[in-house]
């Protein structure tokens, strides 16, 4: 564990990652409702909002867009990812090295581990290499900790999410990005299991402003440290309005009603 509160990934010890790796993970289908959302520049613009601590992208998007934004946004390089075309047991190809992420200008790294997959052993070994290399650069490591595979079908039960956050602690992640377990109590359990590893909620598919902010509020009240969100921000016509509300809930402790005003 390294101290990360003073790193660009955090603001007041909290985290708001704007994720934009969906073109790889899900494919163009995520952009169909709002065609302009396919343009990475639009999400880089959104990432200049003061609520956003880092933008999470894959190497190709970082190479193409980050140089124009390096003064205004902080880069989290996602090191692995899989397309939705892959039909096998959950796995994630390592697409970028920590050395190269640092060269491009990343100040933190992201890595998916599918605990429970038939590929868990290899994924954890790859995570080890990435986490140890990130330590050499002093870069915080964010684990997309998503138990899935075999019998576990995108399970968001409280026990599974608590296990996901515990895996992140045990394997040396500084931040555990986990799915919302459906309640504040479930998130409290996950936060307890993570010890000093910060737990942040993974956004999920687009929902209403109120419903989304309520889950974020529950995460913060449970001791979570923020959010890593994609679709709920950039699938909106006006990403800034929701980012304003997220800033109020995450960094200012506002209620959902106050944030929506
Ligand atoms: P969302 O907020 O849109 O859910 O994004 C978070 C994220 O982890 C992305 O980084 C990633 O592309 C996607 O979710 C993966 O979701 P899943 O593997 O559950 O389909």
Image (cartoon, rainbow, N blue to C red):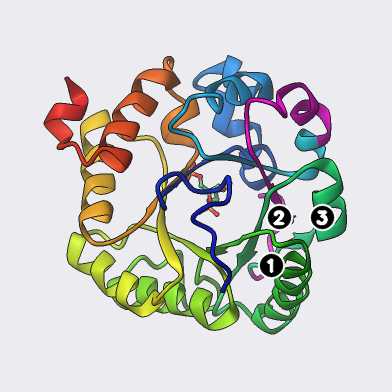
Q: Which disc is residue 256 wearing?
A: none
Residue displayed at 82% across by 55% down: 95
Camera-nearest label, 3 or 2:
3
Residue displayed at 83% across by 42% down: 104
Q: Which residues are magenta?
A: 63-89
Q: Earlier in the sequence, mark 2 or mark 1?
A: 2
Residue displayed at 70% across by 62% down: 138
Assign a secondary structure to mark 1: loop
Q: Is residue 97 visible?
A: no
Q: Which residue is denoted by mark 2 in the rendering?
A: 82
Please tell me whether residue 11 is drawn above or below residue 224 in the rendered image: above
**Rendering coords of residue 87 (x, y %):** 68, 60
Q: Which residue is denoted by mark 1 in the rendering?
A: 91
Camera-nearest label, 1 or 3:
3
Assign a secondary structure to mark 3: loop
Residue contact between numbered discs 2 and 1, judged by CB atoms under 8 Å? yes
- In the rendered image, residue 2 lying in the magenta stretch gets the answer no
**Rendering coords of residue 73 (x, y %):** 62, 31
Q: Earlier in the sequence, mark 3 or mark 2?
A: 2
In front: 237, or 91? Answer: 237
Residue displayed at 67% across by 20% down: 41
Q: Which residue is denoted by mark 3 in the rendering?
A: 95
């Amino acid at each position: 564990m390294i101290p990360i509160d003073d790193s660009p990934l955090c603001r007041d010890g909290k985290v708001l990652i704007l994720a934009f790796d969906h073109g790889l993970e899900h494919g163009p289908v995520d952009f169909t409702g709002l065609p302009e959302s396919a343009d990475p520049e639009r999400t880089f613009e959104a990432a200049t909002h003061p609520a956003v601590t880092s933008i999470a992208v894959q190497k190709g998007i970082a190479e193409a867009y980050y140089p124009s934004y390096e003064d205004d946004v902080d880069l989290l390089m996602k090191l692995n990812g899989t397309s939705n075309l892959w039909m096998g047991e959950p796995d994630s190809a390592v697409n970028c090295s920590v050395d190269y992420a640092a060269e491009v200008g990343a100040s933190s790294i992201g890595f998916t581990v599918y605990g429970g997959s038939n590929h868990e052993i290899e994924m954890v070994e790859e995570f080890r290499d990435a986490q140890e290399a990130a330590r050499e650069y002093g870069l915080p490591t964010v684990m997309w900790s998503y138990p899935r595979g075999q019998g576990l079908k995108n399970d968001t039960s409280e026990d599974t999410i608590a296990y996901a956050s515990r895996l992140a602690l045990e394997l040396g992640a500084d931040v555990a990005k986990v799915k919302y377990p459906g309640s504040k109590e479930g998130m409290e359990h996950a936060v307890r299991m993570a010890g000093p590893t910060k737990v942040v909620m993974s956004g999920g598919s687009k929902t209403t402003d109120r419903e989304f902010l309520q889950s974020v509020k529950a995460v913060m009240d449970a001791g979570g440290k923020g959010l890593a969100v994609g679709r709920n921000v950039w699938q909106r016509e006006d990403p800034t309005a929701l980012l304003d509300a997220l800033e109020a809930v995450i960094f200012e402790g506002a209620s959902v009603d106050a944030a929506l005003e």
